[in-house]
Amino acid sequence: MSVRPIYLDCHATTPMDQRVLEAMMPYFTEYFGNSSSITHLYGWEAEAAVKKAREILATAIHCSPEEIIFTSGATEANNLAIKGIAEAYFTKGRHIITVQTEHRAVLDPCQYLQSLGFEITYLPVQADGLLDLEQLEKTIRPDTILVSVMAANNEIGVIQPLEKIGAICRQHEVLFHTDAAQAIGKIPLDVEQMNLDLVSLTAHKVYGPKGIGALYVRRRNKRVRLAAQIQGGGQEKGLRSGTLVTPSIVGFAKAIEIGLAQMLDETKHLRLLQETLWNKLSQLEGIYLNGHREKRIQGNLNVSVAGVNGSALLLGLQSVVAVSSGSACSSTSNTPSHVLTALGHPEALAYASLRFGIGRFNTLSEIEQVASSAIATIQSLRGATL
Ligand SMILES: *Cc1c(COP(=O)(O)O)cnc(C)c1O
């Protein structure tokens, strides 16, 4: 069997941590009950596991357990938040503010609402990927019902100033939603300090299982109303019907618990790897880093390279390293990344771009190997075009 390439695509998904798998296993077979079965032990066992997981997640973002609504992931959480708010508050107003660099799971529900008559403002970002707060404040109108700004960007890793955005939203009495898919378990999140009303979470970007996530919905100190998008058995306070996936929920909580416990050490580890990669790559001419230098999640390195063809570069690297260009969701289409385009570099369309997503299990020697291969491949492609 040939050796598989080094995995550096952790913004698309992460390998599951062995400890997460171990925590999940008993809930597939032995403790298989339905957490809604209130008449017998099997149901109570599942219900107890879900309760404990809910408490762990609540502690992680400083909310209370009743404010956590389990979903199938961040895509569903974003849909529930954005469409659920639109449906519950349209008599108050029909204006929503979001940002051009959001994930498609925010942009597409917004676009759908636009087709129903809502008005959406897609704010631009500055050259470093950060939102201009003055511009945000000026954009808020009396009929604005929601501001949705992601915590950490999935392409360029930039962390938005959530606390400042939250303060602006609170002052203008507008609800604030954040897509924290890339942030949970990696940077601290505090719904009180940041004035967050809705937060989308997912497990599989932080070494948990795929297909499980959650939406935080504020219930205290101005309770948020939300219209359910999936009706049925009335689980999750009627906001998200469907039998709860106990093993995944247990794994989700375990992943977050590990993420929080290791946050400081892991940030240091990722920072070292990220800096090593950039120090080596930046020895090349015609290469630049996308997004703010410091205000970023440490596993991310997004670079643009002049003088090479993007697909040729990926092809040249694919036996050595699994990376993506732009974001995984748009790398199948040939359109340039909407995030890099929004940064406004005039070269964005002509340059090749690579997104490295470094994770918990990557080592320094892997990073060194990837750096030398990338440098050699870029040099040889440039040589070939001379
Ligand atoms: C991965 C990702 C999503 C989608 O999450 P799923 O759990 O896969 O649905 C949404 N937003 C961001 C920022 C992401 O990185």
Image: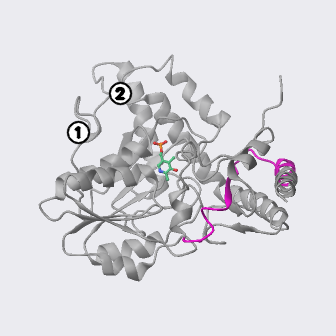
Query: Residue 266 at x, y = what percent?
Result: 70, 55
From what the image shows, is residue 2 above or below residue 261?
Answer: above
From what the image shows, is residue 328 above or below residue 196?
Answer: above
- Looking at the picture, the colour scheme in use is one colour
Q: Secondary structure at mark 1?
A: helix
What's the CA distance linking mark 2 and mark 1?
15 Å
Front-most of 102 and 386?
A: 386
From what the image shows, is residue 43 above or below residue 272?
Answer: above
Magenta range? 344-371
In the rendered image, is residue 78 in sight? yes
Front-most of 215 and 156?
A: 156
Query: Residue 241 at x, y = what percent?
Result: 28, 33
Which amino acid, by three-letter code, is at mark 2? Ser
Residue 238 image label: 1
Residue position for label 2: 35
Q: Which quadrant of the view contains residue 148?
A: bottom left
Residue drawn at 57 percent across, 65 percent down: 158
Check mark 1 vs ligand 1: CB closer than 8 Å? yes or no. Answer: no
- Do tag 2 and tag 1 residues touch (Cβ < 8 Å)? no
Residue drawn at 52 percent across, 61 percent down: 339
Q: Secondary structure at mark 2?
A: loop
Q: Is residue 229 left or right of residue 268?
A: left
The quadrant in which the N terminus is found is top right
Check mark 2 vs ligand 1: CB closer than 8 Å? yes or no. Answer: no
Q: Is residue 155 left or right of residue 96?
A: right
Query: Residue 287 at x, y = what percent?
Result: 75, 66
Which amino acid, by three-letter code, is at mark 1? Gly
Which of the two labelled residues, at mark 2 and mark 1, occupies the earlier sequence position? 2
